[in-house]
Image (cartoon, rainbow, N blue to C red):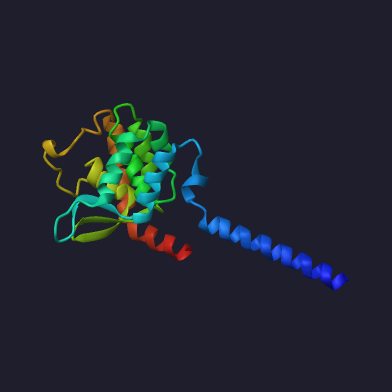
Amino acid sequence: MKLKINILIVFSLLTLAGFMFYFFHNHKTDSLFDPAIRTEILDTVKLIENYGDVTNGVVGYSGKTPQQWHRRQWLMQNATDKELLTLTDYPSGAVKATAYEGLFRKDNSNRYDSILKALNDTTTFFNYQVGCEGNITLLSEYLMTNVLFLDDSKPTPPKPLRFKEYTDKLSKEELDQVKRMYKNRIEKKWNYYYADNKLK
């Protein structure tokens, strides 16, 4: 009788453990992330996360615009400021990059605080695909080079190609601080990358 009760207890515990394992490994990340974000936004977030890469408007030998580019544009245009700010803490690098970019496009965003937050994130990397090439990119590297155009080591595109002067609201002191921090982050980029991957 005691043996049967012990077997029943062990079986029940194993069943519960199996259910919990299945739930946490198969339940959607987005539904556990923040219930305040609208369903249509979360659906697009999940698609961006599943694709994984951040893409330019033109990729591959055929020079096509990938669906990922359209998804990211849709998210930036349709998510509220609050939703975008919340998504800067999302676990996916592609989603984070999109959220920051969407915030920087808005006139009422606190750009300096958002830039500092992005610069202090040294664990978010993703593949950035341009044309036929893909490169492992640090979050702040993507934002400083392709969104804010504050990477002094890269040529700045002509104004017609830039949809906004993102840094108009930054003081000279803030701009200098951002550039100093960015230079420091880029110098340590691969240290961050390999240290983070050792932990996984």
> Compared to 7, does 170 lie above or below?
above
Q: With 10 as the anchor, is 112 left or right in this view?
A: left
**Image quadrant where one finds the N terminus:** bottom right
What x and y, as percent, mark residue 190?
34, 60
Q: Closer to the camera, 90 or 187?
A: 90
Q: Quadrant of residue 137?
A: bottom left
- What residue lies at 28% left-to-right and 36% top-to-bottom? 175
What x and y, as percent, mark residue 129?
24, 56
- What residue lies at 38% left-to-right and 55% top-to-bottom? 50
What x and y, as percent, mark residue 94?
34, 50
Pick out the residue farthest to the bottom: 3
Q: Quadrant of residue 81?
A: top left
Q: Closer to the camera, 42 or 52?
A: 42
Q: Closer to the camera, 147 or 28?
A: 28
> Compared to 165, does 94 lie above or below?
below
Q: With 55 as the anchor, is 18 left or right in this view?
A: right
Is residue 54 visible in the rendered image? The answer is yes
- What residue lies at 48% left-to-right and 50% top-to-bottom? 29
Q: Quadrant of residue 23?
A: bottom right
- What residue lies at 56% left-to-right and 56% top-to-bottom? 24
> Compared to 33, does 127 lie above or below?
below
Is residue 88 visible in the rendered image? The answer is no
Q: With 160 as the anchor, is 169 left or right in this view?
A: right
Q: With 188 as the anchor, is 164 left or right in this view?
A: left
